[in-house]
Image (cartoon, helix red, strand yellow):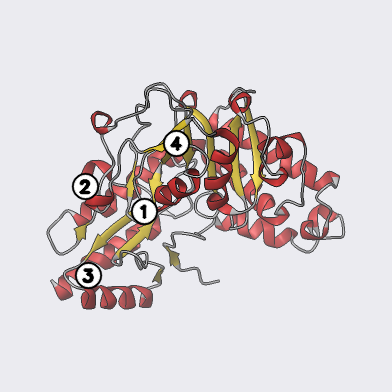
């Protein structure tokens, strides 16, 4: 079976062992005579999957009983709306740190609900870096501070949680979730579209503190957009197959050694790529060094024609999905947890050969 080196930003590559396990069970889940996608979401089989995934996720992160886990639909984009709908009221202020396209979308969705203060915006510098704590002008009374931990389009990443003047973080962690340790004490809520680092498209993981739920509005939230609705029970049919695969990816993460293993692996993969970019000016990174993402490595060549040649020849060498986001162009290698070291080594080898021919 041929498998290419897949650098897609999302939906992204998945562990082969997980895909093969799902393949073997697809028509007959655990000898039940039916596929999991044919079973009720209220069946014992799916209930076990849902609970197992919750417990595995909490184990990986070291989350205590104050944390609830939900598997919702609508992607991170729906969470842009749901978070302020539940936790931001007229007369209140929420801080939103603007570090890229997705944080800008979150800001837009929050503005109808209350005051949105922006402690920093990287828009004028084309989002080439993450702010230092000294640059943040946090509010005195923010009900929460929203961040996008990793920016897939521009290739930047918070190296650690920002200082927020005491307010807890609500974090869109879609593209670096479970790739490195985080300080859970600083968070009120974390959400992540699964399709980058955790599973297939179709499900969004949402983690919320029970203690933070006390800050929820008392009325006016539509039923389906109310977090309490989903905390009380599985309210509507969940994305069964997506959660099923997420559960197996979580199992794989634990078997591989947990977050510490992937932090070490991801650091090594990113180091190989950035070292190649920094050798000379043939490849040009688009991000300031102290803001570089370990998940999405973005760079340019000397001109767009050369970039087209690079992409074409890379694809001919089974190095696929390297084209930068349509809004910025260039090259982007997404190297999430399931992207193997061998794939990055193959890309670096190709980059060296391409430089020799075209430098």
Q: Which of marks 3 and 1 is in front?
A: 1
Q: Which tag, 4 or 2, sits closer to the chain's start?
A: 4
Q: Which mark is residue 353?
A: 3
Farthest-out residue, right: 33
Q: Determine whether the residue tagged by mark 4 lies in a helix, strand or loop.
A: strand
- Left/right of residue 232 with respect to residue 91 in the rendered view: right
- Label 1 near label 3: C-beta < 8 Å? no
Q: Name the residue under label 1.
A: 296
Q: Mark 2 points at which residue?
A: 288
Residue 24 percent location from the top left of the image: 71, 61
Farthest-out residue, front: 91
Q: Name the residue under label 4.
A: 115
Q: Determine whether the residue tagged by mark 1 lies in a helix, strand or loop.
A: strand
Q: Nearer the viewer, mark 2 or mark 1?
A: 2
Q: Quadrant of residue 17?
A: bottom right
Q: How far apart are marks 3 and 2 (CA)?
A: 26 Å
Q: Which tag, 3 or 2, sits closer to the chain's start?
A: 2
User: Residue at image x 22%, y 70%?
Assistant: 353
Q: Distance between the residues labelled 4 and 1?
A: 32 Å
- Left/right of residue 326 with respect to residue 43 in the rendered view: left
């Amino acid at each position: 079976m041929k498998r290419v080196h897949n650098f897609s930003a999302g939906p992204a590559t998945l562990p082969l062992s997980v895909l093969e396990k799902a393949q073997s069970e697809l028509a007959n889940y655990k000898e039940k005579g039916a596929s999991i996608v044919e079973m009720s979401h209220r069946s014992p089989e799916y209930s076990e999957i849902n609970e197992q995934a919750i417990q595995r996720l909490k184990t990986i992160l070291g989350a205590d009983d104050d944390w609830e886990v939900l598997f919702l639909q609508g992607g991170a984009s729906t969470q842009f709306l749901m978070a302020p709908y539940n936790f931001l009221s007229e007369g209140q202020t929420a801080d939103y740190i603007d570090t890229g396209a997705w944080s800008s979308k979150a800001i837009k969705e929050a503005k109808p609900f209350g005051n949105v203060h922006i402690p920093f915006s990287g828009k004028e510098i084309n989002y080439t870096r993450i702010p230092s704590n000294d640059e943040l002008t946090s509010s005195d009374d923010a009900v929460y501070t929203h961040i996008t931990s990793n920016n897939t389009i521009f290739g930047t990443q918070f190296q650690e949680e920002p200082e927020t003047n005491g307010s807890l973080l609500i974090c869109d962690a879609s593209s670096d979730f479970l790739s490195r340790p985080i300080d859970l004490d600083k968070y009120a809520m974390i959400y992540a579209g699964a399709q980058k680092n955790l599973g297939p498209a179709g499900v969004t993981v949402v983690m919320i503190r029970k203690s933070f739920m006390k800050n929820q509005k008392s009325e006016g939230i539509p039923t389906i957009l109310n977090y309490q609705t989903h905390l009380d029970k599985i309210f509507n049919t969940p994305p069964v197959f997506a959660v099923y695969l997420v559960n197996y990816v979580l199992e794989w993460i634990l078997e591989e050694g947990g977050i510490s293993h992937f932090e070490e692996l991801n650091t090594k993969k990113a180091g190989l790529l950035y070292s190649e970019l920094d050798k000379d000016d043939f490849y040009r990174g688009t991000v300031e060094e102290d803001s570089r993402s370990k998940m999405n490595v973005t760079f340019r060549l000397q001109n767009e024609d050369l970039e087209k040649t690079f992409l074409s020849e890379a694809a001919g060498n089974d190095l696929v999905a390297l084209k930068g986001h349509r809004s910025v162009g260039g090259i982007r290698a997404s190297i999430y947890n399931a992207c193997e070291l061998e794939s990055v080594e193959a890309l670096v080898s190709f980059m060296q050969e391409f430089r020799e021919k075209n430098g």
